[in-house]
Structure formats: structure tokens, C-alpha cells
Image (cartoon, rainbow, N blue to C red):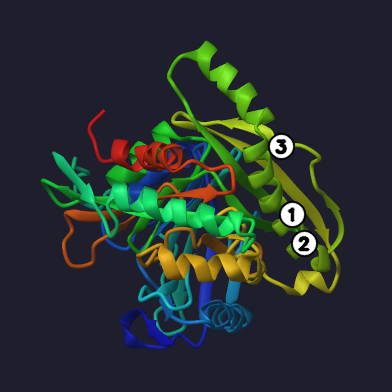
Amino acid sequence: MSLTFANDNEPTTLISRTIELTGTAADTALFSVLPRQDAVAWVRHGEGLVGWGRTARIATTGHNRFSQAAQWWRDLSKRAIVRDEVDLPGTGPIAFGTFAFAADSAAESTLVVPRYVLGRKGETTWLTVISTDARIEPTPDLTELNKRELEPVASPGAVEFRPGAVPPSQWRDIVKDAIGRIENHDLDKVVMARDVIATAEKDVDPRWLLTQLAEDYPSCWTFHVRGIVGATPELLVRREKGLVTSRVLAGTIRRTGNDERDMAHAATLARSSKDLEEHEYSVRSIADIFDPYCASMNVPDAPFVLHLPNVMHLASDVTGVLKPDGEANSSLELAADLHPSAAVCGTPTPLAKAVISEIEGMDRDRYAGPVGWIDAEGDGEWGIALRSAVMDDQDPRKLRLFAGCGIVAASDPQTELAESEAKLQPMRQALSEH
């Protein structure tokens, strides 16, 4: 595990103050305050959290990446001095996080505490300043913050795409291999992912991608944490005031752009035995993990069809009421238990993970890992980092785009390749000028 802090000083105490914004400040567009560097974001339907600056950070790797980060945040939160005049989910001290999909990934998993957080929920907008006992800062006026000379947000220009670790023809063979293993009863489902390399004409500004994604996919959770950016339709877990929720997506069909045809496709998707089977595995895996923590649960009998601009998914919202002892588990610890879900790994999970490691042919980095935020009470929201790209640390013009498909016995390699292309579309489109 590596552990780093802002200004190379370990903060013994976080000092956090949250104030409600009124007047014109309350109408500030969330992305408009972000600088290019150290920006973090978690936004849906114009609500959520954005942050900038850095007060503290932990970077972890390996099998203990979740537990080490969760313990670090628990210890830091216990020592925090908090003045919260708003008292809503997302106020007070906040850490944003992104975690590698696999324990043996070369990618670092990170929790970062911003210096400033701008939040909005419903009609309420707030500003949180998080400093340390080594550097106490007064709460600034947002008008003054907006006078900062931020670097203008610019288009990345023309973008070229090329195959990533595995070319499309080889990926079809990998899917065929996976289907054969399922037919041999080695496993029920496995998710196969692929990547595409994008190289832009100019440096890629994450704020450009955030703005484009939020505009095109407002019902998704648009996120950016330490170089991974995307718009996920899948909420791994929300913990809020003793309630937990998970949105499960499994079973996908591409949209055609024709409303009548898409309605027919939605009906087909809702009746598809292949997609319903895939969805059932994913819902069952979430419910089984929630069960020990919850006094009661609501698991839908049948999914609904979630309509997005590029695809339609079978979706189910699994909800539960935490037991008193279950509340000891933070949203991050619940996310760790839920990861990897059947929706992004497969069933049985240990065997699916082994198959992914053996035949997928790439390091997923933080794609399909948990991404989101946690507060000092342990509440928070964690999505699955889907419809996403990882920015290159060495070349600011490059990104890796990712997409994955759930493979079951009835899958067809060519159809799965087409589905993966549909899932790459949000990031492709975000890189372009509309």
C-alpha cells in the first residue's frame, strides 16, 4: 500500500465547514467551477458533487485495497472537526474514490479528499471547504472562487481510434471460448470486456468529456476521479440513512434511432430468455450479498427496460433496510462486498474471475470497478465504472475506452461484438464536437 497526503504532511485532523449558497451562487453550474487539474465529479440530472484541490489522498493496490482505504477514511473521519450548516447527504467531509477491477491490476486504487466541494440536491446548493489543522482556511465566497482564471475548456479536436489489447476478430474467438466453457457447465455466465485506444489531436480535457456526457446521458451518473471518466447507468450501492439500494443492469439491446422499431426491440428484450437469464444471475448475486446486512429487502419479480440514447437495458432496483449491526458497514465496505457483481464478472463469481484473468487478454485497470464517494458517516454512492475511459498518465492526448458484454450459453460472438460497439459509443461521442 502507498499512502500520500497533500503538501507531504499527514493531516492529523480534517477541518470541514459546509455552508448553504443562496442567490445567484446557488444557481452555479456544477462543472463551471472546475479547474482542469485535480477535478472530481459525481453528477446526475444536474445534481451531485464536484470537487477540486486536494487535502488528502490514499493510494492502495492488491487484495486489501478496499479495506485499507476504508480504514484510512474511518480513522480520518473520526478525528474530523465538522461544522455542517446544511446536513444533507454529501455535506461535511467527503472522499471520492476509484478502485481497480482486479486485485492483481497494476492500476492504483484511490480515495481523495478535495479542498473544495460544490454540491446540489433538489433546491439546495452548498459549498464545503476541507482543510487540516496544519492549514486552516476560511470559507471563501463562491463569487470570488468564480473569479479564478480557469483554463478554458477546449475540444480535443480530431480523434483516431485503434484496437486495444485484443483486436475485434480475436475478441470474437475469446467470446466463443467463453461460450464453450459455459456449455461444458464450467460456469453460468462470464463478462468479457475489450478496450479501444483513442488518440486525440490535442490534449484531452476531462471537463470537456464531463460536460458532453452529462448532456447526452443525464440519467446516468457522470463521474471523474483521478483520470477515469465516464457516465455509468449502473449504481453498485447507495447507503443513505440506514437504507441501501443497488441498480442492476444486465441484458442489452442496441437502439436503432427509430422510435417504433425501438419499442418493438424493448418488448423483445423484455421477453428474451437469454437476456432474462443473464439478468436473473446479476440480481440474485446482489440480493445474496445484501441479505446478511438487511432486516428486509425488496427484490423485484421482473425487470423494467431502461432506455438510454444508445442502448436499452433490463434493469432492477434492489433495496433494503440495514440491520442495526449492518449500519457499521460503510458504503465503501458494502461496495467492496458487492464487487465484482455478476453484471460485470459472471456466475459463479470466483470461477468467472479466473476465466476473465485467463482469456480476456488485458488489464481492466479501473474499468468496471467501484467509483463514487463516501461521507464521514459512511453514507455515499458507488457506481460501476462503465461507459468509461482511462486517461493516459504519460500522454494527455490518449485514452483507453472500455466495453464489456455478459456471455451466457445462448450468446453469439458477432452479436456480442456489436453490443460492445454500442457500449463504446458514449465515450466516442463525448470525444467529438456535437
Mark 1 crowdedness (10 Å alpha carbons): few <14, some 14-19, many ≥20: some
- Asked if the residue at tag 2 contacts the one at tag 3, i.e. Cβ–Cβ closer than 8 Å, the answer is no
Q: Which residue is mark 2?
A: 288
Q: Which residue is mark 3?
A: 303
- On screen, residue 184 above or below 423: below
Nearer to the camera, 95 or 26: 95
Query: How many angstroms separate mark 2 from mark 1 (CA)?
Result: 6 Å
- Horizontal relation, residue 384 to residue 244: left or right: left
* Displayed quadrant of residue 359: bottom left
The image position of residue 427, as x and y in percent, is 34, 43
Residue at the limit of the structure toward the right, as seen here: 295
Q: Which residue is mark 1?
A: 284
Mark 2 crowdedness (10 Å alpha carbons): few <14, some 14-19, many ≥20: few
Residue type of the residue flagged with mark 3: Pro
Query: How many angstroms separate mark 3 from mark 2 (CA)?
Result: 17 Å
Q: Quadrant of the C terminus?
A: top left
